[in-house]
Amino acid sequence: MKKVFTSVLAAALLLMGTQAYAQLSVGAGYLNSQETTKITNNNDPSKADLNGFYAGINYNIPIVAGLGIAPGFYVDMLVGKGNGSIGNQTLGASVTEKYTEVALNVPLNLNYNFNLGRDVSLFVYAGPVFQYGVHSESKFEGTISANIFGVNLNRTENYKYNHYKGNDDLKADRKPFNIYMGGGVGLQVADAFQVIVGYDHSLMNFSAVDDTKTSRSQIKVGVGFSF
């Protein structure tokens, strides 16, 4: 009985210690995404450069000294501009495309903290990021004249295309769910202020079009504050 009580007490003290050092952090920063789309039997993949920002929170839970696990939640927004296309079909030089995307992200990172001196520490982290896109839209401006998925399209007005749902007679060309593998490094000062640089790469195919594969590599640079 004494051993059981001792074990329970030790577990309770450990839990109390974990809660005492757990930290909630908020952060935001710049996001750059390099997207590559490759069609089967085509050796010349197309690339898109997307820029935007992210903002969110994470909660770091210590496991052992220096090592922790941090589930989180953040929202990111990306924008891009280029020559017009729908479903990987080129529309023409007279058309410009403005792309906007908003996604929800749930990272689950293992992290390790290295003490560099008084009130300064370095930490590294790595883990999966589960992403769900809530908005993916292209706005085309100019004269659109093309045959897309067997549909003749000829417009001289602004035209919006929902990549997740499709619209008119056009099918969706993008999947909303993806998983990234990410990692990064950060500097923490006074156990509160953080500067973070991270990198993510998609593990799944974004494209919903047959014989097409779309992947992403992302760089994040931001700041955070721990409570």
Image (tube, rainbow, N blue to C red):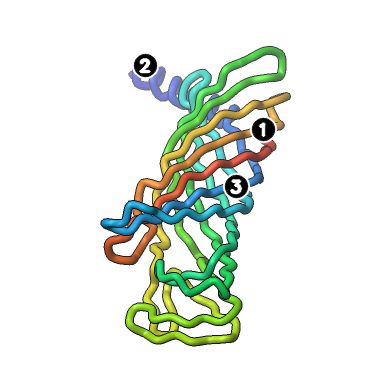
Mark toward the start of the polypeptide (1 vs 2): 2
* Eye-nearest disc, 1 or 3: 3
> What numbered label is drawn on residue 2?
2
Alpha carbon of mark 1 to alpha carbon of mark 2: how far? 48 Å
Mark seen at residue 31: 3
Say if residue 13 shows up in the picture: no
Mark 2: amino acid: Lys
Instruction: Give how far across and how far down residue 97 sits, in percent.
Output: 56, 69
User: Seen from this angle, which residue lies furthest front?
Assistant: 93
- Discs 1/2, front: 1
Q: Secondary structure at mark 2?
A: helix
| 73 displayed left or right of 179 | right
The amino acid marked with disc number 3 is Leu
Q: Residue furthest top?
A: 117
Q: Residue at x 51, y 81 (%)?
A: 144
Tell me which residue sits at (33%, 19%) in the image: 1
